[in-house]
Image (spheres, helix red, strand yellow):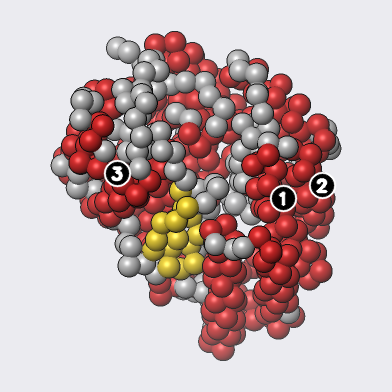
Amino acid sequence: MSDSAYEKLLAKGREIQLVGDAQALLGWDQEVLLPKKGIAYRGEQMAWFSGWAHEQFVSAEVGDWIDEAEAASEDELEKANLREWRHNYNRATCLPKELVEEFAQAKVLSQASWAEARKKSDFEKFAPSLTRLIELCREQAERWGYKDVLYDGLIDRFERGTSTQRISETLGDLRDKLIPVVEEAVATSGDEVPWEGSEFPIEQQRAFNEEVARSIGFDFDAGRVDTAVHPFCSGMAPFDTRLTTRYNVSDFRSSLFGVLHEVGHGLYEQGLNPDHRGQPIGNAVSLGLHESQSRLWENHVGRSRAFWEYWLPRAVEYFPTLGGVSVEQMYASVNQANLSYIRVESDEVTYDLHILLRFEIEKAIFAGELKTVDIPSAWNERFEQYFGLPVNSDSNGCLQDIHWSMGIFGYFPTYSLGNINAAHLTNAALSQSPEIKDQMDRADYSGLLSWMREKIHARGSVLLPDELIEESTGSAANATALVDHLKSRYLRA
């Protein structure tokens, strides 16, 4: 093949990656440190970076390099890079630079608007920003094109190879299998908090969370944990991965499970091949795989009995008020099945109902069936239908998540795909390497992490999501493993 064409693509990719990583750092700073008066200027900065990167990538010479390299490439990794460059180039060239810049700036302003609206539980303050983001996302999807419905074009950003119809079928199958499990689990679960009235100082929570994160394998020489309104992971590079959580002085579980979730994302980012930085294959393959890692460490590990048999004595050292709590009480407390308002604090068994609600709202928005002004009432009606609870505030309802303020419509269903993938991958890891269970019983998580490093993290985007699942486990994922896991954990024998 023409080495010059492929080498030019690699050089251009590295250049664009540097700018993209700088944008990610600015995005992290916006949520963690940016003063209020800097928001408008940050919007200008993000718009410029986005416009520059877009202009660099959509140039005619890049298209010529891809054509030339495709004609001669025979190497597996080169073909994977070219597959992704072609896909991304075809989509990027559909968008004018002005739209890319406006979208980047609108996201910054919208996130600030959302944070203020959430604080005051006032959807009307956020509605104008949200309306504009929906318009911009609609225009992007129209320009990209789609097979069946416009929402397909948005989903493609996060989960290659799937569609609205396929996700609807997957979540519909999960819902049908899940509803009876939810009903029985909620009916039989206790709601006692064995440390009622206790306080958990934030500094002790930080220290305990860091010890847990280190034990699982998160490298603090290549990452950090900070505080934000909404927990997130920002992966600038495998050697700079930043997590956030939020704290509740009355309940240490909120920050702990926030950290466990984001550490799962962080481990994926830190496990990507640094030699492939700047190449498409050096990035995570999909959000459905990314969320599988966060949900795996948060739930399959962090909510297990074995986890608390080891970590409860250590927790008592940080929080003496837990001294009278038994392992069985702690295990029950982190696996209570309750119908509650907040997605990020919900239990495993009801979590996917939260996702189904958001997926249905997003589908309705982009099918033209739901106006922005009607989102709170539509949310509240569906929430009461699924959870039997009247929504008591916008902050406990449609304002609780940051995602829409970031313009990432199509992201939410990947959480349920992540749950399905997490159960499937866990089963495969324990089946292929039975010693992993014994290791985890001793709070040694190196075997599980090594399996994920080899099978998922280091593979990056060499394969598409479905292909990677098949390669790593030997079969396609479906809802059965997840439902079986939930039954074994939540239903009484």
Give how far apart the Cα atoms at labels 1 and 3 are.
43 Å
* Amino acid type assigned to the residue bearing label 1 in the image: Ser
Position of residue 470 relative to residue 338, above or below, is: below
At x 75% / y 27%, what residue is drawn? 378
Instruction: Give x and y (percent) for residue 335.
Output: 37, 26
**Extreme residue in the bottom direction:** 4
Image quarter where the C terminus lies is top left
For residue 58, side relative to residue 185 (left or right): right
Q: Earlier in the sequence, mark 1 or mark 3?
A: 1
Instruction: Give x and y (percent) for residue 351.
Output: 50, 30
Instruction: Give x and y (percent) for residue 488.
Output: 33, 22
Q: Give the residue pinned by disc 2.
A: 128
- Specify few, some or many for label 2: CA neighbours under 10 Å numbering under 14, 14-19, or 20 or more: some
Viewer-nearest of discs 1 and 3? 1
Q: Give the residue pinned by disc 3.
A: 429
At x 54% / y 70%, what residue is drawn? 21
Location of residue 360 (image quadrant): top right
On residue 27, which mark appears? none
Viewer-nearest of discs 1 and 2? 1
- Which is nearer the eye, 226 or 416? 226
Dot 3: element: helix
Is residue 115 visible in the rendered image? The answer is: yes
Q: Earlier in the sequence, mark 3 or mark 2?
A: 2
Image quarter where the N terminus lies is bottom right
For residue 480, side relative to residue 447 (left or right): right
Give how far apart the Cα atoms at labels 1 and 2 are.
9 Å
Pointer 1 and pointer 2: residues touching (CB < 8 Å)? yes
Q: Give the residue pinned by disc 1.
A: 113
Dot 2: element: helix
